[in-house]
Amino acid sequence: MSDRAADAAGLGRPRAAAFMAPALLLITAFLVVPALWTLVLGATNYRLTGLAAANPQFVGTGNITEALSDPGFGWSLWLTLLFVLGSAIFGQSLAGLSLAWSLRSAPKVVKAVVETLVLMAWILPSSVVAFLWVAYLSRHGGTLNAILQTPGTDWLIQHPMASIIVFNIWRGTAFSMLLFSAALSAVPPSQMESARLVGAGTLAQLRDVVFPHIRGHVLTNTLLISLWTFNDFTPYLLTAGGPNHATEILPVFIYNRALYGGELGYGSAISFLMLIINLVIALFYVRLLRERR
Amino acid sequence: MGEIRIEGLTKVYSGNVTALDRLDLTINDGEFFALLGPSGCGKTTLLRTIAGLEVATSGRIHIGERDVTKMSPGDRDVAMVFQDYALFPHMTVSDNIAYPLRIRKVDQASRAQTAARVGAGLGLNGLLERRPGELSGGQQQRVALARAMACEPSAFLFDEPLSNLDARLRLEARTFLKGLQHQLGVTTVFVTHDQAEALAMADRIAVMEAGRLRQLGTPAEIFHRPIDTFVANFIGSAPMTMLDADLVRGRLYVAGTTIEQEVAVRWSGPDPSDGPVVLGIRPEYVRVGAFGPMTVQATIRIVENLGATVLLTAETASGDRLQALVPDGTQPAVGAQVELSPVAERVLLYDEEGHLMTPATQAAPAPA
Amino acid sequence: MSPQAFLRRVGFVLFLAVVTAFWALPMLWLVTAPFDAHPGLTVRWPEWTLDNFRRLSESPYAFSSLRNSVLLAGGAMILVTVFGALAAYALSRVHVPGRGAILYGMLLLSSIVTGTAAMVPIFQLMFTLGLIDDRTGVILVLTGGLLPAAIFVLKDFMDATPRSYEESARVFGASPTQVLRHVVLPIARPGLATIAVWALVNAWGDFLTAYILLRDPTKTPAGVVMYTFYSEGGQANLPLISAFSVLYALPVVVLYIFVSRRYGFRFHGGIKS
Ligand SMILES: Nc1ncnc2c1ncn2[C@@H]1O[C@H](COP(=O)(O)OP(=O)(O)OP(=O)(O)O)[C@@H](O)[C@H]1O
Ligand SMILES: [Mg+2]
């Protein structure tokens, strides 16, 4: 169906505008305005309390240059990079792909059970799963220590980054799994068959037959989960950025500095940098979407 | 009451596509009228503009006594059957048929009654409680017809009503639709790009091209006297053979053949001036053997069996192709040297611009 | 079976076992502890009881927070579905100038301006509007964040339904509102249900927005109360936490089952953004 009638239901432009108005208003108020506000706030020394609260001064790019030279920010950026690389780009992608691949040939019941478990991890409210992991990893009486026979190990203190990375793999693999199962089911079985007939092993099949088909999906998946992981606040619920800033990824850093510590101007400058990084990832993604249309 | 009069109708889509170009057309009351033409010529646009789904850029439309140009679709008292039937998937057949009455606030009981009555007339009893998704293509089409009939409009508009049916069903539906229209006597406009369908069903046909009317006439007129080479090419199951010819002092010469004819014999008006012309010959009116004044020597190249008839493609000495449609069993073999004789009264002459030169008096056949 | 094939088989089974354990183990606690008379942090076979749920009423905030969650998630769901459907319909059916730009702009915005990246300006904005500690404010912020994706998905859905349905109704004389009521709404129902569930689950699980915008403990939703239950100093009240987390998680599980039964779990990358 191309651009047939300009107006199938006879709505007319005025009514169409009225239909769109509430949504556009809300989006403008809560997405566009905050984005612009970040710019303005980021350029002031605004604080929640004290002198600067009453009379914020314009500091220009001062906050941004301050951020860029602040070791706390650099450290946080480094942790974020580790977090995104480890839990999303490697962890979730690989786990999602291997799950999607192996569940194809698994018995129906097994498939249903594993899929449901992985999906549950994804859709349960974040404060619930966070506590589940706090309990699971806890030093005294945690189930993990009981299984591994490592009593007294405090995972969240001794291995904080590894813990939240593994946690996020557990939490977010579902999306990659769903996307890759959809992608794999679109690979023509005849091509797999003929690869198997000429004696290709699993790896060769993946490389020669499957990968060319799912290349686009791999890219989509990587971009989306990177974006989401980059913006994920859930680790805060496990460690609140501690111990001693060891898990203070950017979202947590912003929260701790701006809303907890009250440095709104400085926090805005970091938010601004975060928005820019988001923009870069999102632009890639939207371009990808457009090309596929 | 159901006459549709179209005056100077123009439709320009955004992006400057002129889909209809100053169209004048009158569709008589009770007529079964076909809009025929190649893809993209504006048939659907014309139909939708009559229905009010598109707004005319300029020009007027009257239905009966009323000027409906500015009216909204619901006020025009027409019913439209869409190519995909547009049956509402969430309503039963009965609710679908009675939908126009629901809009008119007819009560539930009489709606069901009407749906049952109209449905029965179209052989839909027993299907009334089903959903459209549970019907065959032919049944869906009849539900769509029933829904259109239920609102008793002053005109029906059909957009390619048969194109979603398979070949066999299409023939049946053709006969059925024609019978139905005859019985109802309601003005009906239908769009098709299938010339056979138009010839078979319509009382009159409008052949369109690029938003303009090329020819308007009965099926017989259109078939036997296509007004120009465009229409001639478009009409007929086998395309008309076009031979370049020369008119010299009232005589017709076709290069490489012995066709040589005293044109004056067949012209009642003033003699046409000398120059190149095009000779149009329908394969249906070419016989094998030497008959009459227009005999051509040719070699049979292709023989296609069409069942009761056989289509021969032959090549003349000058390399022109000439086709002939002959009864099965009378066809010569491939490679045979034969004489082919176009029926002189059926041959058409077109001038260099492709306009028909043969005067109307020569058109022999009365509509069968 | 050749030894090689056997090994591969064993590897396959082992892999599935490890995967299942990895995902199941942390979740087991949610199934056992709430029904255990003396819940600890370790997963164990419970001494069955429902007493923990009764003790929920002893906490002043447990039930009120669930009510708040219903309010917030329900409000966001209704606004997202209604406003999203209206906008998507207009964008799909009426040629609005620059609609491609509007759509892509919105999609881009919603991926960039996430709750985390924009928490500071959103806090500021709500502060200025006097909507701090106001549940309406949370609903509006959540709605604004979910709307673009909802519009995008719904527009795709509307684009896939033929216009001839509406045109047909119109030729029979239906007014625009009748077209919407009789034809568009019923046909779009699966798409609307999908978006409603999606919005509900997202808003239900929200933590950050409510955490930064609500102060009054009688107004905070379950997500935040759950966090305060275990993050506030002192001995964690495990009977309370376990029973509460089940109640809080249950609606999501029920919806998941409903959605996967009804539509299969395949729509647009699933239930979360
Ligand atoms: N909504 C529209 N916007 C712009 N151009 C259009 C629109 N609808 C149709 N057109 C153009 O107008 C011309 C006529 O289209 P129309 O659909 O009337 O043709 P048609 O004769 O019905 O063709 P077909 O046999 O393929 O259905 C075409 O060039 C088409 O591309
Ligand atoms: Mg058409």
Image (cartoon, rainbow, N blue to C red):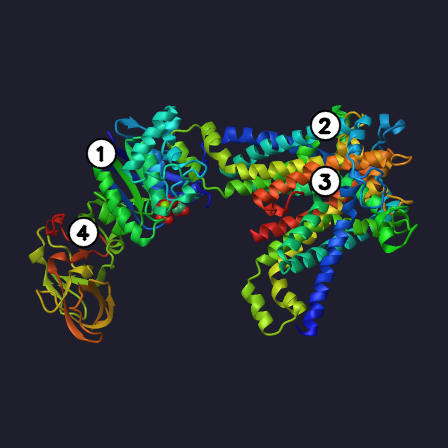
Q: Which residue is mark 3?
A: C114
Q: Position of residue A281 (x, y in %)?
A: 70, 49
**In this rendering, would A74 be left or right of B140?**
right
Q: Secondary structure at mark 4?
A: loop
Nearer mark to the viewer, of 3 and 4: 3
Q: Label 2 marks which chain's residue? A: C
Quadrant where the N terminus of chain B is found in the figure: top left
Q: Which residue is mark 1?
A: B29
Nearer mark to the viewer, of 3 and 2: 2
Q: Which residue is mark 2?
A: C67
Q: Label 3 marks which chain's residue? A: C
Identify the residue at image location x=63%, y=58%: A107
Confirm if mark 2 falls within 8 A of ligand 1: no
Badges 3 and 2, same chain = yes
Q: Does A23 appear above or below C100?
A: above
Badges 4 and 2, same chain = no
**In this rendering, would A105 be left or right of C120?**
left
**In this rendering, would A287 be left or right of A172?**
left
Query: Which amino acid is tagged 4?
Result: Arg
Badges 1 and 3, same chain = no
Q: Position of residue B365 (x, y in %)?
A: 12, 51
**Mark drawn on residue B225:** 4
Q: Pointer 1 and pointer 4: residues touching (CB < 8 Å)?
A: no
Which quadrant of the picture is home to ligand 1?
Answer: top left
